[in-house]
Image (cartoon, rainbow, N blue to C red):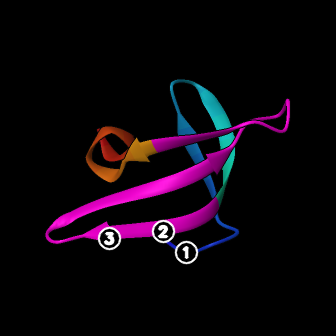
Amino acid sequence: MKKGQKIKYKDKYYFIKAVIRQGKEKFVLIQNFDKTHSVVNVEDIEQ
């Protein structure tokens, strides 16, 4: 996963703004279409 990549999450597409790594955990900061941001675990996206 890279910054700027388009991903599908819960039947919608989002752009990744940042990739956050904390130990073995990985999170991504995604931009919603109403210009708000959400932090999502990478494991939730890949399933």
**Amino acid type assigned to the residue bearing label 3 in the image:** Arg
Image coordinates of residue 7 in percent, x first then y, are 58, 50
Q: Residue furthest top?
A: 11
> Is there a contact, CB below 8 Å, between mark 1 and mark 2?
yes
Report if the CB atoms under discs 3 and 2 are less than 8 Å apart.
yes
- Packing grade of label 1 (10 A; few <14, some 14-19, many >=20) is few
Residue receiving disc 1: 2
Q: Report x, y in % for residue 34.
A: 85, 29
Q: Which mark sits nearer the N-terminus, 1 or 3?
A: 1
Left or right of 25? Residue 37 is right
Residue located 55% across and 53% down the image? 29
User: At label 1, which amino acid type do we have?
Assistant: Lys
Q: Which residue is drawn at 29% across and 38% down?
A: 47
Q: Could you tell me which residue is drawn at 62 percent across and 72 percent down? A: 3
Give yes or no for residue 42 being in the magenta stretch. Answer: no
Q: Which of marks 1 and 2 is in front?
A: 2
Per the rendering, the mark at residue 19 is 2
